[in-house]
Image (cartoon, rainbow, N blue to C red):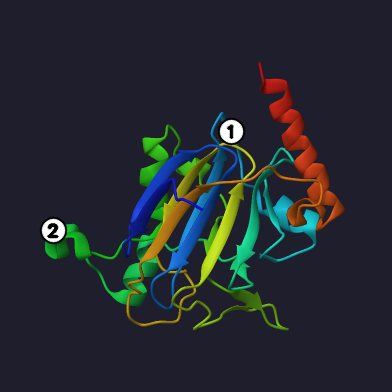
C-alpha cells in the first residue's frame, strides 16, 4: 500500500491538518514511551467534534482499541481503530499543561532553551486551534495514542509505565472528513522524571470501501447506528 503522505513528529511537536474521509492514518512509534494527544473535529462543521462520554458509554468501554470507533457529539462515527498493537488507547487522562510540565520536568523557555524548551499539550492544542478558527473553549477531552491509564479498586488513575514500545502502531480510518489536531507531548500522568523525547511517524493511505462485514461497524449495535448516521449525513451532502 503506497503512502499518500508521511511525516515524523519530533518531541513536543504540534500539528493540524484537514484529512478527508476514507483515509487510513498509521501512527508508528520510533522509540519506547510514546504519547500523542489527539483532538478531532468535523472538517465541514467545526461545531461537531469527538465526544468522549458518548464514545465510551455507547460502546461500554473505558479505552479504545481495534474495532472501536470515535463518535461525535451528533452520534456519528468520525473514525475507527482498525489496528492497534498496544491493545489500549487512553481516553480519560486528558493532556499536559504548562504548570504540570514545569512542576515535573523543570521550567524552560524559548529564550533560554530555544526549540528544546518543554512543550505541553494544552498550549499546543490552543495554538493549532487558533490557526483553524477555533479557540481554547473548543478543547475537549482528548485521546492519548500509545498510553494506557486505568483505575484501581479505589478509583485512582494509574499510568502504565513501559506500555508503549518502539515499532508499536495504531491505524485509524477516517469515516468523516476531519480536522485533526495533534500534540506529541507527554501523558499528564507519565511517571518519568525526565521529559520524554519520543518521535512518532505518521503515514496516510487511501482506505478501501467499508463493507457490511467490517469489524468496526459490527463490534457493537451502537457502532452500526453511528455508521448509519454518518452514511446518511454524506448521502444528503452528495450532489
Picture coordinates of residue 90, whole percent (x, y) = 59, 67
- Give how far across and how far down residue 86 sits, in percent: 58, 73
Packing grade of label 2 (10 A; few <14, some 14-19, many >=20) is few
- Density class for disc 1 (Cα within 10 Å; few <14, some 14-19, many ≥20) is few
Foreground mark, 2 or 1, reads 1
Q: Is residue 239 above or below residue 116?
A: above
Q: Are marks 2 and 1 in contact (CB under 8 Å)?
A: no
Task: Identify the residue position indicated by label 2 in the image.
Answer: 111
Residue farthest to the front, as pictured = 1
Q: Residue at x 58, y 54 (%)?
A: 172
Q: CA distance from mark 2 to mark 1?
A: 36 Å
Residue at label 1?
Answer: 47
Q: Residue furthest left?
A: 112
- Taking 196 as reference, is 45 left or right? right
In the image, 216 versus 94, the foreground residue is: 216
Which element carries disc 1, helix, strand or loop? strand
- Give the residue drawn at x 32%, y 72%: 197
Residue shown at 35%/45% (left/top)? 127
Image quadrant occupied by the C terminus: top right
Q: Residue 98, relative to residue 180: is it above or below?
A: below
**SS assignment at label 2:** helix
Amino acid at each position: 500500500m503506497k503512502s499518500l503522505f508521511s511525516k515524523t513528529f519530533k518531541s513536543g511537536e504540534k500539528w493540524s491538518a484537514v484529512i478527508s474521509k476514507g483515509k487510513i492514518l498509521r501512527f508508528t512509534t520510533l522509540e519506547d514511551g510514546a504519547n500523542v494527544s489527539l483532538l478531532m473535529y468535523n472538517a465541514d462543521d467545526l461545531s461537531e467534534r469527538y465526544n468522549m462520554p458518548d464514545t465510551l458509554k455507547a460502546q461500554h468501554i473505558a479505552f479504545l482499541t481495534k474495532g472501536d470507533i470515535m463518535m461525535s457529539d451528533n452520534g456519528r462515527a468520525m473514525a475507527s481503530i482498525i489496528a492497534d498493537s498496544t491493545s489500549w488507547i487512553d481516553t480519560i487522562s486528558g493532556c499536559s499543561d504548562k504548570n504540570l510540565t514545569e512542576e515535573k520536568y523543570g521550567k524552560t523557555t524559548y529564550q533560554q532553551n530555544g526549540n528544546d524548551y518543554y512543550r505541553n499539550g494544552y498550549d499546543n492544542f490552543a495554538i493549532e486551534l487558533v490557526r483553524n478558527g477555533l479557540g481554547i473553549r473548543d478543547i475537549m477531552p482528548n485521546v492519548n495514542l500509545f498510553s494506557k491509564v486505568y483505575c484501581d479498586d479505589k478509583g485512582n488513575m494509574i499510568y502504565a509505565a513501559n506500555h508503549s514500545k518502539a515499532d508499536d502502531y495504531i491505524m485509524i480510518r477516517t469515516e468523516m472528513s476531519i480536522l485533526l489536531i495533534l500534540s506529541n507531548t507527554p501523558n499528564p500522568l507519565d511517571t518519568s522524571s525526565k521529559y520524554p523525547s519520543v518521535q512518532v511517524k505518521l503515514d496516510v493511505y487511501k482506505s478501501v470501501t467499508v463493507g457490511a462485514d467490517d469489524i468496526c461497524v459490527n463490534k457493537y449495535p451502537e457502532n452500526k447506528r453511528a455508521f448509519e448516521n454518518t452514511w446518511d449525513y454524506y448521502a444528503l451532502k452528495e450532489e
